[in-house]
Image (tube, rainbow, N blue to C red):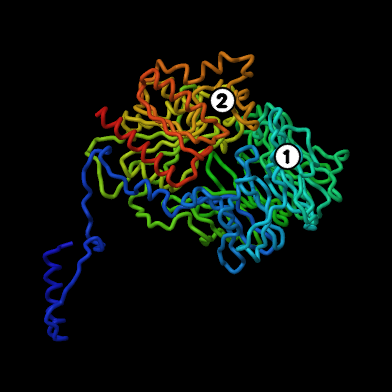
């Protein structure tokens, strides 16, 4: 833009206006940033001197999380909204058929189940009534959709007759509206919790204790009524397996509140096969996803393919190299979230024509699709804007129902995920996402490469997904590259990839991190300066990396991570009480040496890099004793560290003030360490 020339034109035009309207003075305000043809020159600064484009408090400002979408027979849409600004309260929200949004449950109620400690669907809707689990007391309450300002009414007892606390998840109402079905967990004063399937009679106008209809297995989940209410199906499994290792799908006749277990059918699943999910078709057939262990990587059995169970016979619906991970049935169609090498895809399978259609949609990652009438609802993640609840047509066109954040985001400050795959030292392949540092105000000196912050997801049987995140933006806009790793053991890549971590946790995933960094360095994407961060199982891998590869990272952040596998095994909850038998191999009693050998706390003599540790005081999954033990030994040994424990937080922080504080502390910790090394 030629400012001198254009200023002359402005002055001439203003003189004409003065003469035409006989104006003596004209005052103008010029907003330089609004000139589309004027480029503001970027400031050249070293990566570590960049200031983030978004502050820590802005990361969690006007921001909510979406989960557990569902619809009812009236095409109303429901979801659970996690609100950091309300101390992490989980609020059930509704969009009615007229498009009006409203909270279904009032303050201070919060719907969240503690079954397995991780929870699951904590509500269901039947006609005009919503039944939900309240987090504080774990009781089931009901509230009318026509009176959402009223106080919810409890329908289960505060404590069982034997004094134990009951917990509920995966709620479902029978087609006739009489029975409320659920996965049930009861505290056990003599040992581990007891898991069963129970129900209550909604015709009874009194507080009820769960009536148990299925018991005996170690775990139960996802009980559902058949469309005519004559049968109930469920998934169960036993120690020492996890549900992605071995699960069993059953179905049994149901009548008048009783399940005929003498005539139950074992539909699918075995010690070497797991069921991803199932649903009933409108005709009462069961559709389920199953994979099988010890298969060739290219075999369809290595992936969660779809099957149909009809009158005692099982038929293939798909035979692909796709993981049909989560899905829903509606009429004669199945709507599925499937993964292909970790990439999310939306498929619609027509049961009549046997046609499998890949529905192209804008989000690059999304939740399980919920069909309702002619539309599909899901939570979608995008490259450069916050996640949204979307209404999607059968052609793939989408409409936003609600955004997770209304903050204005400058796309020039957003780093987009670049999918990468790379060879590992042992001749295999691993995956991840690379986010380059991005800030419209800064550019680095020519030839300078950025520091990298490695992210390690939890689980460890989990996955990381691409898409915009204000937390990612916070780091990339202050000069860091991000390497988000889907190490071997992650889901979404087939069973062989997932099972590659069995007996090798603490070995394989840290090798994948190391090899990924080597790959990025060789490509010229990053410098030799690296920090690492992870939560839960990812926190264990952080501590393992710092002690196994002591020269690889300048610093690490462990969020409610694990330093001592022996302590974890002795204190962890029922759901994961045998998890380490799969991940390490053997039990603590017959393989203690291996548990100790892979515990970072026993290798602190190799630790060269400072560590910052964050922990919630109420964590039942990774109890605070794990982090306290590590912090105490670091203190005794005089090793540079910081330890922060947040009262009232459990496994994953939910309160806005604690989310902000931990993010600020981690950022400052890393910057101080890296600047001191320069």
Q: Nearer the viewer, residue 271 or 318?
A: 271
233 on left or right of 101: right
Instruction: Report crowding for label 1: few under 14, some 14 to 19, many 20 or more residues within 10 A (C-alpha).
Output: many
Q: In this rendering, is residue 9 above or below 356?
A: below
Residue at label 2? 568
478 on left or right of 336: left
Q: Secondary structure at mark 1?
A: strand
Real-space CA distance between mark 1 and mark 2, rounded to the nearest whole angstrom: 27 Å
Disc marking residue 644: none
In this figure, what is the number of numbered marks?
Answer: 2
In terms of image quadrants, where is residue 244?
A: top right
> Which quadrant of the rendered structure holds the N terminus?
bottom left
- Residue 415 coordinates in the image, percent (x, y): 37, 46
Mark nearer the viewer, 1 or 2: 2
- Residue 64 coordinates in the image, percent (x, y): 49, 52
Q: Is residue 142 visible?
A: yes
Q: In this rendering, is residue 29 above or below 512?
A: below
347 on left or right of 437: right
Residue at label 1? 235
Q: Please give the name of the residue rendered at 24% of the width and 60% of the height, measured from the top-left corner.
A: 33
Q: Nearer the viewer, residue 62 or 329?
A: 62
Q: Please give the name of the residue rendered at 61% of the width and 18% of the height, measured from the top-left corner.
A: 588
- Residue 118 coordinates in the image, percent (x, y): 60, 39
Q: Is residue 355 visible?
A: no
Q: Secondary structure at mark 2?
A: helix
């Amino acid at each position: 833009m030629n400012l001198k020339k254009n200023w002359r034109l402005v002055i001439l035009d203003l003189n004409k206006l003065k003469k035409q309207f006989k104006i003596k003075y004209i005052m103008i305000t010029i907003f330089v940033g609004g000139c589309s043809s004027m480029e503001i020159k970027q400031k050249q600064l070293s990566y570590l001197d960049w200031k983030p484009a978004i502050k820590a408090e802005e990361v969690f400002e006007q921001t909510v999380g979406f989960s557990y979408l569902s619809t009812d027979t009236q095409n109303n849409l429901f979801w659970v909204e996690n609100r950091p600004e309300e101390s992490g309260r989980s609020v059930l929200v509704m969009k009615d058929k007229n498009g009006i949004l409203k909270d279904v449950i009032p303050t201070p109620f919060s719907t969240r189940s503690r079954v397995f400690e991780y929870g699951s669907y904590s509500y269901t809707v039947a006609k005009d009534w919503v039944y939900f689990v309240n987090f504080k007391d774990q009781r089931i309450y009901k509230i009318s959709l026509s009176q959402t300002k009223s106080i919810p009414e409890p329908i289960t007892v505060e404590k069982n007759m034997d004094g134990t606390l009951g917990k509920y998840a995966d709620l479902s109402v029978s087609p006739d509206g009489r029975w409320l079905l659920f996965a049930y967990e009861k505290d056990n004063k003599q040992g581990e919790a007891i898991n069963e399937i129970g129900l209550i009679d909604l015709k009874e106008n009194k507080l009820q204790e769960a009536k148990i209809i299925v018991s005996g297995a170690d775990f139960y989940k996802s009980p559902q009524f058949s469309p005519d209410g004559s049968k109930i199906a469920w998934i169960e499994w036993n120690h020492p397996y996890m549900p992605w290792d071995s699960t069993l799908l059953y179905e049994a006749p149901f009548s008048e509140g009783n399940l005929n277990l003498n005539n139950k059918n074992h539909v699918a699943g075995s010690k070497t096969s797991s069921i991803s999910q199932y649903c009933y078709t409108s005709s009462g057939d069961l559709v389920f996803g199953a994979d099988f262990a010890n298969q060739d990587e290219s075999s369809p059995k290595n992936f969660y393919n779809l099957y149909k169970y009809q009158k005692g016979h099982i038929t293939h619906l798909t035979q692909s190299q796709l993981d049909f991970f989560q899905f829903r049935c509606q009429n004669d169609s199945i709507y599925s979230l499937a993964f292909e090498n970790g990439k999310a895809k939306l498929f619609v399978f027509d049961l009549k024509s046997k046609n499998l259609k890949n529905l192209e949609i804008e989000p690059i990652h999304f939740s399980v699709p919920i069909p309702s009438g002619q539309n599909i609802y899901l939570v979608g993640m995008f490259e450069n804007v916050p996640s949204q609840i979307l209404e999607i047509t059968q052609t793939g066109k989408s409409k936003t129902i609600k955004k997770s954040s209304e903050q204005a985001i400058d796309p020039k400050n957003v780093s987009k995920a670049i999918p990468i795959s790379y060879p590992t030292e042992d001749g295999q392949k691993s995956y991840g996402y690379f986010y380059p540092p991005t800030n419209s105000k800064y550019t680095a000196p020519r030839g300078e490469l950025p520091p990298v912050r490695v992210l390690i997801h939890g689980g460890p049987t989990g996955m990381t997904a691409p898409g915009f995140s204000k937390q990612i933006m916070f780091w990339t806009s202050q000069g860091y590259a991000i390497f988000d790793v889907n190490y071997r053991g992650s889901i979404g890549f087939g069973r062989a990839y997932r099972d590659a971590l069995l007996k090798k946790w603490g070995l394989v995933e840290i090798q994948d991190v190391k090899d990924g960094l080597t790959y990025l360095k060789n490509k010229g994407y990053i410098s030799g300066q690296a920090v690492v961060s992870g939560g839960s199982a990812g926190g264990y891998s952080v501590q393992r990396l710092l002690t196994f590869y002591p020269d690889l990272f300048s610093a690490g952040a462990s969020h409610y991570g694990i330093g001592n596998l022996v302590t974890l095994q002795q204190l962890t909850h029922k759901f994961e009480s045998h998890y380490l038998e799969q991940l390490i191999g053997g039990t603590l009693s017959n393989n203690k040496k291996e548990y100790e050998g892979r515990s970072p706390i026993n290798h602190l003599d190799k630790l060269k890099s400072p560590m910052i540790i964050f922990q919630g005081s109420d964590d039942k999954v990774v109890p605070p004793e794990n982090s306290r033990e590590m912090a105490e030994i670091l203190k005794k040994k005089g090793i540079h560290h910081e330890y922060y424990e947040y009262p009232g937080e459990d496994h994953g922080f939910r309160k806005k003030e604690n989310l902000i504080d931990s993010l600020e502390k981690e950022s400052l910790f890393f910057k101080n360490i890296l600047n001191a090394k320069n």
